Image (cartoon, coloured by chain):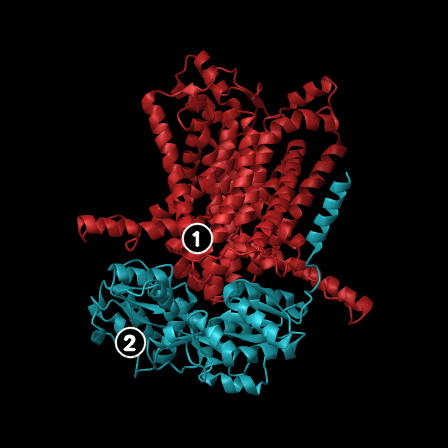
Amino acid sequence: MRNVKLMLVGLLLTIMSGCGAPDAELVVYSARNEPLIKPMFDRFTEETGIKVVFVTDKAEVLMQRLQAEDSNTPADVLLTVDAGNLWWATQNDLLQPLESAVLTENIPEYLRDPEDRWFGLSVRARTIVYSPERADARMLSSYEGLADPMWRGRLCLRTSKKVYNQSLVAMLIAEHGEAKTEQIVKGWVANLAADVFANDTAVIEAIAAGQCDVGIVNTYYFGRLERDNPALPVKIFWANQGSGGVHVNVSGGGVVRDSRHVENATRLLEWLSAGEAQSMFASSNLEFPANPAIAADPAVAAWGQFEASRLSLARAGELQSAAVRLMDRAGYR
Amino acid sequence: MRIEQTVSARDAPGLRHTTHHRVFWLLVAILIATPVSIVLLQIGSAALAPRSDAWAHLAEFVLPRVIGNTVWLVIGVTLSAAALGTVLAWLTAVCEFPGRRFLAWALLLPLAIPGYVLAFVLVGMLEYSGPVQTLGREIFGPDLAIPAIRSRGGVILVLTLCLYPYVYLIARNAFQTQGMRALEIGQSMGLSIRSGFFRIALPLARPWIAGGALLVAMETLADFGTVSVFNYDTFTTAIYQAWFGLFSLESAMQLASILVLFVFVIVVLEQRLRARADFAATGSQGTGLGRLRLGRKSAFAATGFGFLVLALGFVIPFCQLIVWTFGSGSEFDARFFGYVWQTLVVASLGALLTTVVAVCLAYAVRNRGGPARWLARWATLGYALPGTVLAVGVFAPIVTLNNTVQELLVRAIGPGAPQILLQSTLVAMLLAYLIRFLAVAHSPVESNLLRITRSLDENSRILGVSGWQMLRRVHLPILRGGVLAAFTLTFVDIMKEMPITLMTRPFGWETLAVRVFEMTSEGEWARASAPAVAIVLVGLIPVITLTRGSSRVD
């Protein structure tokens, strides 16, 4: 009987654990996954003595959570991927503007919020990949060019439900307007070799297997496959060189509006934007550093220099909803 | 054929069914239905917002396609899972063939494989770039045409393989206790085995099969992970598109409300399907004639079929997971034991709570009938909502409560009051699981309770057994199979559950499902294999316990 009582008490303690704010100097809500951020936070704590706790979830859910928790949120920092999400966070007043000379110096203007409420911390390029055996690189030029009938039955794309494609099309709208962009997207759909895929990896594998000849993917997915199989018969082509530049997006973060630890939170972002931390943050996922002073991972650098689109990423957020509608209308699933 | 269907007793005044008693059970049902009502209200009130232009867009370009897709999917999966589950349950419960004893429990194993994992593995294998087609092209040349796996048929196949165990487990329970007897009756009436099955055993097992099929239909409607691997657009994907793509949570909630109404219609249909009769087996066992021995050819076919389903639904995906675990440096470190432990804690607490509540609810329905019956239907609707929508719906009221309490605290103590976070406690987590999985526990318990007739109660009373005694000595032995099934199903479902776990887990609380999410969110499926394997292994615990438990009845 005593054992049962002890067990019950233990159980009760377990159940109530976590009731009350976590005992830490910094709480992070992160849509970037644990294997990528945990080593960073451990390093940060080692160097600064500031303890960090975090939860991971989908970006949209974390933002909904911040909205619901309102001024009682335990969160100090929101880390997420994609400019569209960061834009939504600012639209709903979830983040606060920061005055940090370090951040404004480290992160170029087009990779951060115009009012400095969020900052890009790593850059992901979304570009063309092709099969060197079946597609001539000289025939490739731009995202727009993939709408050309010469690619009929040769193009593979990921589903339009992925935010990466929504941002890409949003940027096309920013550049060409809706009417022309819709023509381009319809051209892509007409050229598809197979039903759209659920992820970028499947697109690259389809090209490798010969199902199609070209596709559009984020480079880090390509990097992972290349790391596992150096003989991968697929190559990267930097799109739109000389005509606007490669579409880039960011993973980034900002300080939560009602953070109780603004100073430490800002310090974490600053720490992530410079030095070895910035290098680690980008290379752990084979992305590009947001800070131009930091060199990319050798495996990433091997893909060569490219000109990136300088359109402000906040525009991608503004136009994302328009992009989703446009793709629905064009029949891009 | 209406053998052993007694006339409905629920309206007949029982000996001790005083008004007092009836009010008590109605209150129990209301209490149980309250949390889900709050969540549905939360979703419904968000849906009351004026229709945005996002809605107009969805109505014109998205809904026409997804409605058709959804209807086909639900019908296809529900019918095929019901058929598959029933056939397998009949074979293993009543017939004798080589491998039966093994298959009887092994056929539950696909339950432990999350749908999106099975989808990912099968699509990966059977797609153009997968090993099967690549090998085919090497042998037969590049023009080999194989039907695409990423098609309506493909999704239905995968979901059927994942979900048939719901029907299998519940229907098997029915056949075990009354299957042989049904055949004996058939034989005594001069029916062949075949017509004995179709005309007696099957109609008798209808509430069980329907209960399982209802779970399948609800789970199919709520599914997001599996259909998105196939890129098959359903109502649920449209909900997420409205929310994540068009940034219109209102439209998402409006769609979710329509989904709830749709499910309610299905639920009502199922209720009708059960007819207005109580089903009961008077003697709980066959008379020991032994199992039905299949002829050589049929026995061979039964064994082959059982192993085929097992291979597709479990062996192939599990082997792939094992290969990935050893091949890709998927990490197994000391923290892993922590994940397993925390998974065990939430899954067993959650399953225990849900099962106990389900039993209470089933008794409320039995003792009160009428309104309690509807409240029970209402209380189990949470299972049909897409996980993330439900998670947000549960989270918001808890946060509101928390913030109110916090405000009172600050007013009482001053600004130095400690910050409380009810939303990140196990209590919130368990409550959310209860709302989501009550249907899963309720179905098997309710159908088992049907078997305890009023006359059984009266007889016991005449023999001087009543109250707790009756519950323990008369009811529990009959309910046991249903309660064990309820516990197992909820345990495994909670283990696999992601959105609620992610949103309500206490800081630093990591379960195996959370680990799977961490890896798959960036598409690193191979690295997710170690936690996925662990989910399967932990899932074996209740499955084996269940088999042991029910084999005593065997």
Q: Residue at x 25, y 62 (%)?
A: A212
Q: Which mark is residue A142?
A: 2
Q: Secondary structure at mark 1?
A: helix
Residue A304: image quadrant is: bottom left
Relative image position of residue A109 (x, y in whole percent): 47, 85
Q: Residues within 10 Å of mark 2 (few under 14, many from 20)?
A: many
Q: How many discs mark residues in the rendered view?
A: 2
In the image, residue A69 above or below residue A6: below
The chain shown in red is which? Answer: B
Relative image position of residue B268 (x, y in whole percent): 53, 39
Relative image position of residue B508 (x, y in whole percent): 61, 60
Residue closest to the eye, A292 or B294:
A292
Q: Read off the chain for label 2.
A: A
Q: Identify the residue at the far right of this view.
A: B412
What's under tag 2, amino acid-wise?
Ser
Whether residue B406 is visible here, answered yes or no, is yes
Residue closest to the eye, A132 or A128:
A132
Chain A drawn in what color?
cyan
User: For mark 1, what is the residue?
Assistant: B325
